[in-house]
Image: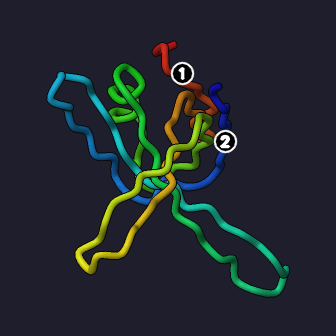
């Protein structure tokens, strides 16, 4: 039985995207989104950074259109990566696998199919 995850995040691109190819020739683009959390109107927002990963045609589109500081909405699923750190302790990170990106500064939408 498969479980389904869905996530939608709106924020600002925190770094320039990094594009690479896997050993099998698939394009992957990674970048982080900064998400502001407001708890009190008089206080500064707390910021979380979420890593985003896009694949193939969407990765190629993101490499050309995603820029640091731009406001985006990313829709997709979640994946948890786990590994053993140098100190022997288990580490983990949640990654948003983007299936659709909306560029909120320009109101442009790009989907995994490249539309």
Residue at image location 82% in from the left, 86% down from the top = 42
Location of the N terminus by quadrant is top right
Left-right relation of 39 to 94: right
Residue at image location 51% in from the left, 54% down from the top = 94
Residue at image location 76% in from the left, 86% down from the top = 43
The answer to whether 30 is drawn above or below residue 15 in the figure is: above
Q: Residue 37's image quarter? A: bottom right
For mark 1, give the secondary structure: strand
For mark 2, give the secondary structure: strand
Q: In this rendered view, identify the residue nearer to me: 2 or 108.
A: 2
Where in the figure is residue 19, as x and y percent of width and height?
26, 39
Where in the figure is residue 104, as x and y percent of width and height?
63, 40
Q: Mark 1 Cα within 10 Å, few/some/many (few <14, many 20+)?
A: some
Mark on residue 16?
Answer: none
Left-right relation of 2 to 60: right
The answer to whether 13 is drawn above or below residue 103 in the figure is: below
Q: Mark 2 Cα within 10 Å, few/some/many (few <14, many 20+)?
A: few
For disc 1, the marked residue is 111
Residue extending farthest bottom: 42
Where in the figure is residue 54, as x and y percent of width and height?
42, 34
Marks 2 and 1 close (CB-CB < 8 Å) = no
For disc 2, the marked residue is 7
Where in the figure is residue 3, as x and y percent of width and height?
66, 32
């Amino acid at each position: 039985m498969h479980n389904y995850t869905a996530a939608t995040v709106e924020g600002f691109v925190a770094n320039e995207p990094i594009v690479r190819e896997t050993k099998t020739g698939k394009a992957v683009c990674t970048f982080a989104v900064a998400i502001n959390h407001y708890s009190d109107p008089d206080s500064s927002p707390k910021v979380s950074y979420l890593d985003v990963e896009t694949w193939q045609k969407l990765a190629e589109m993101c490499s050309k259109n995603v820029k640091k500081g731009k406001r985006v909405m990313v829709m997709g699923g979640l994946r948890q990566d786990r590994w053993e750190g140098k100190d022997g302790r288990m580490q983990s990170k949640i990654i948003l696998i983007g299936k659709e990106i909306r560029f909120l500064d320009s109101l442009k939408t790009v989907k995994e199919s490249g539309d």
